[in-house]
Amino acid sequence: MPTLPEQAWRDFSANAACLEADSAGIHTRYLNKWIGIYKGQIEAVADTFDGVADVLSSKHIPAAETLVRFIGQKEMTLIL
């Protein structure tokens, strides 16, 4: 069984892979929206960061384990 840091890294990697795997499609579908990716799946979409947080909370998804990103016109490099 993986240790907590190993599992957290695997979960983060799955979330990042989801974002990168279909970056063009995600950009097209969710332009000017906030998205929340949990366990490799887009689980929340909203117009605001707080809206994504509300959706995550309503689904009992831990925000600390979710990749949240704004999909804007210009691509950005995020350093985490």
Image (spheres, grey):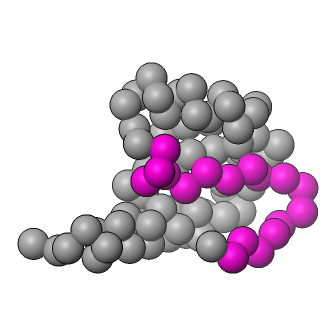
Q: Is residue 58 magenta?
A: no
The one nearer the camera, 51 or 20, is 51
Q: Residue furthest left?
A: 1
Q: Is residue 78 magenta?
A: yes
The residue at the point 61 percent across, 34 percent down is 52
> Residue 3 vs residue 39: left or right?
left
> Residue 50 vs residue 21: left or right?
right
The one nearer the camera, 51 or 71, is 51
Q: Measured from the top left, where is residue 17 in percent x and y?
A: 50, 70
Q: Residue furthest top?
A: 58
Classify the position of the C terminus by image quarter: bottom right
**Which quadrant of the structure image shows residue 3?**
bottom left
- Which region is colored magenta? 63-79
The residue at the point 53 percent across, 68 percent down is 16
- Seen in the picture, residue 71 relative to 22 is either above or below; the reply is above
Q: Residue furthest right?
A: 73
> Residue 58 vs residue 70: left or right?
left
Classify the position of the N terminus by image quarter: bottom left
Using the rendered image of the protein, determine whether residue 10 is visible from the camera's viewpoint: no
Q: Measured from the top left, where is residue 29 in percent x and y?
A: 71, 45
Q: Measured from the top left, where is residue 78 in percent x and y?
A: 72, 72
The residue at the point 17 percent across, 74 percent down is 2
* Picture mark count: 0
Q: Measured from the top left, where is residue 15 in percent x and y?
A: 47, 62
**Which quadrant of the structure image shows residue 26?**
bottom right
Using the rendered image of the protein, determine whether residue 19 is visible from the camera's viewpoint: yes
